[in-house]
Image (spheres, rainbow, N blue to C red):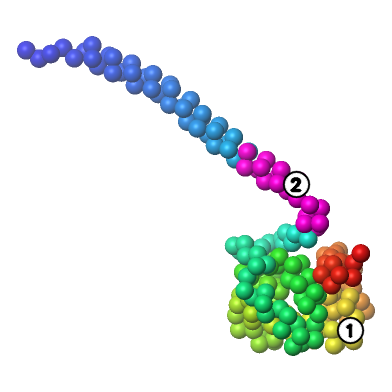
């Protein structure tokens, strides 16, 4: 005689029904916990930011719009090449550091929406003109960018404002306007680089 399993089937069916009702709630609980943990992380990060000394907040590199690269900070071995390359091309080290910070924040693989690449954000045609084969090689990029700054400084007879404006907007636009072009981005760029340069060189009280 076969055992009567109808009662067992009903019990199992009831258990499954209960589990179906409970499972979504468990999933929601897990999601809520994940959300809580994420919020905690954000709050912790914001709290750390608030506790940073004002001086450190000011010297942190600005966010560069359009950067699509892994973060590589200003602590790479390439920094050792800044001083000798700056001396080679007659450009102040403090100025080079200010341009790097403004251009890429020290990210060696930085790429802008316009296609500028590397530490000193060289455009492909500029990189080629300067003999830079690999714009993402930090030392090549450094030498190319520093050489370009030197060339611009010579072109504008040491006028740093015009040289920086040309580095950002191109010498053609600077020549066309007879100075800093009336572009908000370029005007902001020149102002910020000069400010960082003065801090780096110790000439800003």
Q: Nearer the viewer, residue 89 or 135?
A: 89
Q: Is residue 40 left or right of residue 160?
A: left
Residue 149 is at least partly visible in this image: yes
On the image, the x and y values in percent for residue 98 come to 78, 70
On the image, the x and y values in percent for residue 23 come to 43, 26
On the image, the x and y values in percent for residue 115 come to 67, 71
SS label for mark 2:
helix
Q: In this view, does 197 lie to the left or right of 128?
A: right
Estimate the spatial distance between the alpha carbons at disc 1 and disc 2, rounded to whole Å: 41 Å
Count every numbered label the image shows and give the total. 2
Q: Residue at x 71, y 78 (%)?
A: 82
Callout 1: few (<14), some (14-19), or many (20+) C-alpha neighbours within 10 Å? few
The residue furthest left is 1
SS label for mark 1:
loop
Residue 189 is at least partly visible in this image: no
Q: Residue 75: say if magenta.
A: no
Q: Which residue is drawn at 59% across and 35% down?
A: 36
Q: Which of 72 and 154 is in front in this view?
A: 72
Q: In this view, does 153 lie to the left or right of 19?
A: right
Give, as a single range, the part of the protein colored magenta: 40-58
Query: Which quadrant of the rendered structure holds the N terminus?
Result: top left
Q: Which residue is drawn at 72% across and 62% down?
A: 64
Vertical position of residue 199 compared to residue 127: above or below: above
On the image, the x and y values in percent for residue 166 come to 83, 77
Q: Residue at x 30, y 18 (%)?
A: 13
Q: Mark 2 points at which residue?
A: 51
What number is the disc on residue 158? Answer: 1
């Amino acid at each position: 005689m076969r055992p009567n399993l109808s009662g067992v089937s009903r019990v199992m069916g009831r258990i499954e029904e209960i589990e179906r009702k409970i499972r979504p709630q468990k999933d929601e609980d897990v999601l809520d916990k994940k959300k809580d943990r994420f919020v905690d992380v954000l709050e912790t990060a914001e709290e750390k930011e608030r506790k940073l000394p004002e001086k450190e907040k000011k010297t942190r590199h600005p966010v560069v719009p359009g950067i699509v690269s892994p973060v590589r900070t200003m602590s790479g071995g390439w920094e050792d090449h800044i001083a000798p390359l700056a001396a080679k091309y007659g450009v102040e080290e403090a100025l080079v550091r200010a341009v790097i910070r403004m251009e890429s924040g020290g990210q060696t693989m930085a790429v802008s929406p316009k296609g500028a690449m590397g530490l000193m954000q060289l455009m492909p045609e500029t990189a080629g003109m300067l003999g830079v084969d690999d714009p993402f090689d930090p030392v090549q990029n450094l030498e190319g960018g520093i050489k370009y700054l030197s060339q611009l400084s010579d072109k504008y007879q040491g006028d740093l404002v015009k040289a920086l404006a040309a580095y950002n907007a191109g010498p053609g636009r600077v020549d066309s306007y007879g100075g800093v072009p009336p572009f908000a981005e370029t005007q902001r760029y020149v102002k910020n680089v000069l400010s960082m340069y003065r801090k780096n060189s110790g000439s800003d009280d």
